Image (cartoon, grey):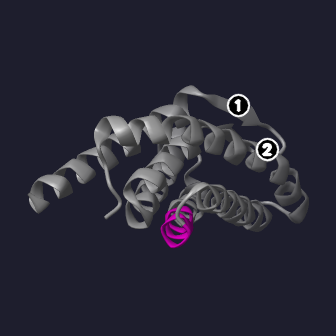
Amino acid sequence: MQKQVQTKKMTLAAMLLALAIVFGRLFLIPLPWTRGNVNLCDAAIFIGAMLLGPWYGGTIGGFAGLFLDLISGFAQYAPFSFIAHGLEGLLTGLVMRWLPGRWGRFLGLAVGIIVMVVCYFFADSFLYNWATGTLGVIPNTIQGLIGALIALLFAKPLRRRLNVSLK
């Protein structure tokens, strides 16, 4: 029985990783001033953290960010995205595990967004300059908020439909 549950979780994680990459490529808004883009990969990362927990959320986030940058022509961002989105999924899931319920979801999503925005601020500042890092804060925050909203709308119905538990 435990093996079946583990297989189900791994399959769902793989599907969410693929969904994050698809969302990241199809829903893409280029940002000329940061040489990056805003996308919807965060929605699948947050759903993974909400449904499967911190380790799956971190894995989905890290590899989604890494693969998206590699296939999008932003290889210089790949290690930063692995860290930014990996921490986003991991910390979102950890907060939600430690503080279950509505406030845990909101706090977990807020922590995930803040971590992602701060990581990209430093990535942009390191790769280019502090002004570029500062210019990326608002678009990255909007990207995180939209991803969080989508996750809040879809995670609960998906949890019921898929019968997935964090335990």
In which quadrant of the rendered image does the C terminus lie? bottom left
Q: Nearer the viewer, residue 31 or 109?
A: 109
Whether 163 is drawn above or below 54: the answer is above
Whether 139 is drawn above or below 7: the answer is above
Judged from the image, the secondary structure of the residue bearing numbered disc 1 is strand
For this view, does 86 lie left or right of residue 30?
A: left
In which quadrant of the rendered image does the N terminus lie? bottom left
Mark 2 or mark 1, which is nearer the start of the sequence? 1
Q: Is residue 18 visible?
A: no
Tell me which residue sits at (35%, 60%) in the image: 166
Q: Amino acid at mark 2?
A: Pro
Q: Hey, which residue is sitting farthest right in the picture? A: 131
For this view, does 109 lie left or right of residue 98?
A: right
Return the x and y of residue 53 as percentages of the image width and height.
41, 61
Return the x and y of residue 142 as percentages of the image width and height.
76, 43
Numbered circle sitting on residue 139 = 2
Tell me which residue sits at (85%, 63%) in the image: 129
Judged from the image, the secondary structure of the residue bearing numbered disc 2 is helix
Whether 123 is among the magenta residues is: no
Q: Which residues are magenta?
A: 90-99
Return the x and y of residue 92 as percentages of the image width and height.
56, 62
Label 2 neighbour load within 10 Å: few <14, some 14-19, many 20+: some
Assess whether mark 2 and mark 1 are in contact (beta carbons under 8 angstroms): yes
Q: Nearer the viewer, residue 122 or 85?
A: 85
Q: Nearer the viewer, mark 1 or mark 2?
A: 2
Q: Amino acid at mark 1?
A: Ile
Give the labeled residue for mark 1. 29
Tell me which residue sits at (29%, 44%) in the image: 163
